[in-house]
Amino acid sequence: TRYPFVSFSKGYEELANMPMNVRRGHTHGRLVREYGVAVLAVLLAFGARFSLDSHLGAQIPFEFFYVSILIAAWYGGLGPGLVSVLLGCVLGSWFSLLPGQALSLKAFNDPSSVVAYLIVGISISAFGQLVRAKQRRLREEEVAHKQSHEKITAIVESIMALGPTLETGVVEH
C-alpha cells in the first residue's frame, strides 16, 4: 500500500470491487421486498376503499391509493412507487365504472380525475426516489468520514509510536 502504517479494511476493498447494483443493495431479495411492499400497500388501500364503497359510491376512487404510493416510494423508490401508481389506477378505476363497462378513459364521465391521479402519483414516486438517493449519499458520506477518521487515527498512532525514536534521532529500518 502507499501508506504502510495505514491498513485498509478488507470490507472496504470488497465493497469497491462489487458491481454497482449490489453495492446499492439491489439484490433479488431486496427487490422482491420493495415491490412486495408496493403491492401490499395497494391491496390494503383497495381494501380500505372497498370497505367504504357503500358510503362513497363512485366518489373519490383514487384518494386512498395516495398513501400506498407514499409507502411504496419511501420504502422502495421510483420503481415500486410507479407500480403502486399503476395498480392504484387500475383498482381505483374499478370504483368509477358502471356495471358492464370496460376499463378505458371513455368509461369515465370526467377522465381528469385519472389524469390528476397519475400526475400526482408519478410526482410522489419521483420525489420518493430523490429522498432515497439523498439518504444513500448521506450514508456513503458517513462511511467515508468514518474510514477517514480511522486512517487519520492510525497515522497519528504511528507517528506517536515513532516519538521516542525521533527524539534520539535514530530510526531503525
Image (cartoon, helix red, strand yellow):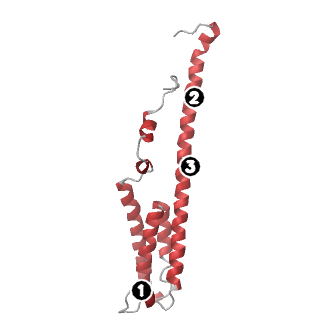
Q: What amino acid type is highlighted by mark number 3? A: Leu
The residue at the far right in this view is 167
Task: Give the residue drawn at x 55%, y 64%.
Answer: 127
* Crowd class of label 1 (few under 14; some 14 to 19; many from 20; radius 10 Å): few
Sooner in the amino-acid sequence: mark 2 or mark 1: 1
Q: CA distance from mark 2 to mark 3?
A: 22 Å
Question: Residue 162 got which mark?
Answer: none
Residue 130 left/right relative to 44: right
The quadrant in which residue 38 appears is bottom left
At a point 44% along the width and 81% down the height, the residue shown is 92
For label 1, the SS is: loop
Q: Which residue is mark 2?
A: 153
Dot 2 or dot 3: first in sequence order is 3
Regarding mark 3 in the picture, which secondary structure is present there?
helix
* Res. 159 visible in picture: yes
Residue 104: which disc?
1
**Is residue 43 toward the left or the right of residue 130 in the image?**
left
CA separation in Å, label 2 and label 1: 65 Å
Relative depth, front residue between 57 and 83: 83
Image vertical order of residue 82 relative to residue 156, above or below: below
CA distance separating discs 1 and 3 = 43 Å
Q: Residues within 10 Å of mark 2 (few under 14, many from 20)?
A: few
Question: Which residue is found at the position 35% from the left and 55% from the top?
Answer: 29
Answer with the quarter of the image where residue 105 lies: bottom left
Residue 68, given in percent of the width and then of the height, sits at: 46, 70
Give the residue number, with chain letter if any, for mark 3: 138
Residues marked 2 and 3 touching at CB (< 8 Å): no
Badge 2 vs badge 1, beta-carbon distance below 8 Å: no
